[in-house]
Image: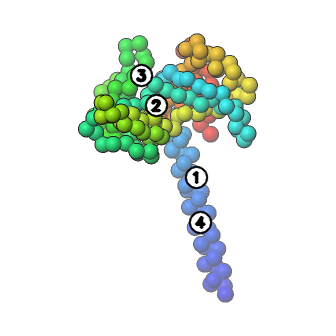
Amino acid sequence: MRSERRNLWLGVAVVVAGQIGVLGWMVWDRVHLLSSGREIVLEVVPVDPRSLFRGDYVILNYDISRVEIPRGKKRLHRGSLIFSTLQKTKDGKWKLTAAGPERPESVGPDQVVLKGRVRFASRVARRGSNVATVNYGIESFFIPEGTGRELEKLVGQKKLAALIAVDESGNAALKGLIVDGARVYEEPLF
């Protein structure tokens, strides 16, 4: 009886320690990405929805969210992993230069690779290519209540951009929002 009770408590302790370890790793992974990831700035097109649990947030859409995979490449399906290569232009903007189901072997100093998942894919018959809508995990940002309408106006004026942190594996996190070159919202590390 005592041995069974001790084994039960030992099992509970192992489960609790495992859960704490997983939560700790998740927090560390996010903090590490936001604090040490390479920063890039992307232009956005938000919508102002509202969450009952967390308040106002913006849904962000990017030019890089729609990619075309040339003929002859592996066909994409919903949920497929995709790697998008971005190139920094002379004006400091980041533009999509290539996308595909395999990670590029090398990238230049003014390039970064984002890892995403295909949300929707279709085939363009006349060109034989795939067109995909991609989620990179940077599509929503929680903001102070009542500021969503103000952000919508800034988007119409093309003054809003997103600050993204990207690690070596291509994982991306939304670090903040930029208006006219100045950071106005920043994602807290915790």
Q: Position of residue 103 (x, y in %)?
A: 32, 39
Q: Is residue 12 left or right of residue 25?
A: right
User: Can you identify the residue that label 3 sits on?
Assistant: 94
* Disc number lying in front (1 or 2): 2
Q: CA–CA distance between discs 2 and 4?
A: 39 Å
Q: Nearer the viewer, residue 51 or 120?
A: 120
* Disc number lying in front (1 or 3): 3
Q: Which mark is residue 15?
A: 4
Q: Is residue 188 left or right of residue 131?
A: right
Q: Which mark is residue 23?
A: 1
Q: Earlier in the sequence, mark 2 or mark 3?
A: 2
Q: Are marks 1 and 2 in contact (CB under 8 Å)?
A: no
* Disc number lying in front (2 or 4): 2
Q: Which residue is at 66% across, 27% downward?
A: 48
Tell me how the rendering is colored.
rainbow
Q: Secondary structure at mark 2?
A: helix
Q: Which mark is residue 65?
A: 2
Q: Earlier in the sequence, mark 1 or mark 3?
A: 1
Q: Specify the amino acid type for callout 4.
A: Val
Q: CA–CA distance between discs 1 and 3?
A: 33 Å
Q: Position of residue 114 (x, y in %)?
A: 41, 35
Crowding near pointer 3: few (<14 within 10 Å), some, many (20+)? many
Q: Is residue 29 visible?
A: yes
Q: Are marks 2 and 4 in contact (CB under 8 Å)?
A: no
Q: Earlier in the sequence, mark 2 or mark 4?
A: 4
Q: Which residue is at 59% across, 31% downward?
A: 59
Q: Secondary structure at mark 3?
A: strand
Q: Which residue is at 70% across, 28% downward?
A: 144
Q: Specify the amino acid type for callout 3.
A: Trp
Q: Secondary structure at mark 4?
A: helix
Corner quadrant of residue 180 = top right
Q: CA–CA distance between discs 3 and 4?
A: 44 Å
